[in-house]
Image (cartoon, rainbow, N blue to C red):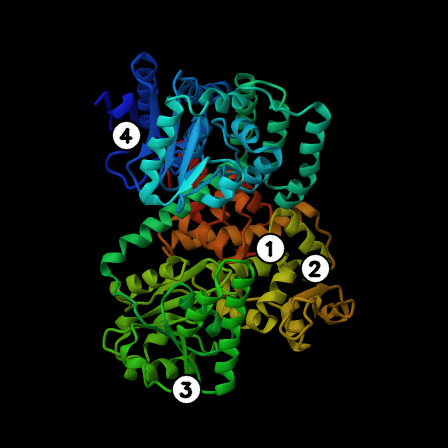
Amino acid sequence: MIYAGKAITLQALEGDIVELKFDLEGVSVNKFSRLVLEELRQAVDVLKSEASIKGVLLTSGKDMFIVGADITEFLDAFKLPDEELKASNLAVNAIFSDLEDLSIPTLVAINGMALGGGFEICLTCDFRVMASTAKVGLPETKLGIYPGWGGTVRLPRLIGVDNAVEWIASGKEKNADEALKMAAVDVVVVPELLREAALDLLSRAISGEFDYRARRQPKLEKLKLNQIEQMMAFESCKGFVAAQAGPHYPAPLEAIKTMQKAAGFGREKALEVEAAGFVKLAKTSVAESLVGLFLNDQELKKKAKKLDSLAHEVKLAAVLGAGIMGGGIAYQSAAKGTPILLKDLREEALQLGLSEAAKLLDKRVEKGRMTSAQMAEALNGIRPTLSYGDFGTVDIVVEAVVENPKVKQAVLAEVEIKVKDDTILASNTSTISITHLAKALKRPENFCGMHFFNPVHMMPLVEVIRGEKSSDAAIATTVAYARKMGKNPIVVNDCPGFLVNRILFPYFGGFARLVGSGIDFIRIDRLMERFGWPMGPAYLLDVVGIDTAVHARNVMAQGFPERMQEEQPSAIDALYEANRLGQKNGKGFYAYTLDKGGKPKKALDESVNAVLAPVIHEAREWSDEDIVNLMLLPLCLEAVRCLEEGVVETAAEVDMGLVYGIGFPPFRGGALRYIDSIGTADFVALADRYAELGPLYQPTAKLREMAAKGQRFYGQSSENQI
């Protein structure tokens, strides 16, 4: 052994080859942390000093190669002064460049995922051999930054500007065939032959059969495009990328600008350009929010995984109710490998549910995400039934019947008799108390909520609701099933509206107040979309369904009358009375027709103004800033209350629920991180400006205490982290 650290070893092989292996102790994946980079510096220095070495082989001791930098260190690093952060990046680049500049050939064997810095170090090598099952990519733009360890410099010089822009701006992973086609790697082999193929190619480079210096040279020089070619290559893609990314996500466009600015320089100067641009992006609130969301997501996954030891294995599931929601649940379960029974009272309902599942599967085939054979297998995994005949072997039943407590209780009590004693029952209710529904059951400990969001196949969130008598095993099994379905479960304690709807309806309350003041709902929609929401509140209500919104609003008003009871009829009441239910019957705030693909297409409908006229109770002017504040303050304050009351345990769960469940703008990080970005003291002062409007706009005593102490929901504060 030439060198041995906690993450990196240098081992002499036959033919004077040295293997540099990444294998970080005590963890399942390799990441670039401070420790790993320190050891890499030492290992490269050893390689530089050993004259007898003829070639270097980079490998990984894990199933994945290197998944990138340790993101837990990002936010602290981003707070460094600009020059320190730039120097830190350049120090890493110095290590990578020294590896690239060794006077001997280097080759990397990519056995698994190589992302971010993990792929950037692959780019420093002269040759890249990739397992056919591996993936590579530079996903940094998804975190509000761009590759900062040479990715914007080396990749365009290796695969061309157009390809590099697409790789970096999209942040998408590439499979082995894609990487080979674009010359990002040199050889693709089956995993079993990876090491043999890598050593063979490296030996041939050492013998002179392949000129490693010629392979290396383009990465050291400026791009081989003249000024006109550069302008055409970069300018042609800026508009497209800017339109795709939108105004709130600057990283993709900044990456292109950096590549363009560095195109006329050799490697060292180009790396300096990259580092300067990286610092600029790292200091943005977008980067802080997106990195924060990534860390929140990791925290949620860890919490969910901790429950695995208590979960029962779900080999067969069932869903009661074969409507659009039931069909979506059946599709999601079967598509992810868990067979499911689809039960309803009517044959036509079963056909509707199967049709919904088949339609979704067919779309996956059209997009190349599934083969026809896989589609057939998934469809065979959905067994329609009009009876409970096969329910004796079911491990979990998801009830998805009409949102009526008496109907749900009757159905749950009926199915409880038909299943095993340890079968978990879960209700897909969006508003009804799990504790209340459990009163109809003989085994309430086996019952919990499992709230999917519509459309099931697109929305990543599942709320798993703990009732007063729900057992840990019931919660753990439901969480494990949700994860197996490819969803992100959050465990929520029972309360009206649970987490997401409880926070959403004060937002709708702000909307109702504005419309009641005579503010045009189209103006409100445009302002909130400009703020970053995928759709404004009027459009969202049309998608949710006005009747659904009225029902949920009434549940919330009953549960929290001091804040959510409306004194006068509102816009949604007016639309409900006029039978304008939104997309489901073609008219709501907007009018809808189906486009060629069968999707509802929104259009303005002036006839709605007459419907809304009776609920305009006062004419009051509000500025654009006021409108945004009147919408967001109730939402944010209810999010604070949910955390304070223990509806969920952490700020991360609150914010991820809002991002995953209702599309809260990811670049703002969630409601609680949004408060942090304003500052708790400034946020409380902002709320106090509107306190006269009632309890929805009044901060809690604990939030005022946080503001006085300078506390935050995330990170460090002047006293303690909350």
- Residue under circle 4? 7
Q: Which mark is residue 521?
A: 2
What element does badge 1 sit on? Answer: helix
Label 4–label 3 contact, CB within 8 A: no
The CA span between labels 1 and 4 is 58 Å
Circle 4: residue type: Ala
The CA span between labels 1 and 3 is 52 Å
Circle 2: residue type: Phe
What element does badge 3 sit on? Answer: loop
- Residue under circle 1? 693
User: Quadrant of residue 221 in the image?
Assistant: top right
**Residue 720 placement (x, y as % from top left):** 36, 36
Q: Is 416 displayed left or right of 76 in the figure?
A: left
The CA span between labels 1 and 2 is 19 Å
Label 4 or label 2, whichever comes before in sequence order: 4
**Number of numbered callouts drawn:** 4
**Residue 402 placement (x, y as % from top left):** 48, 78
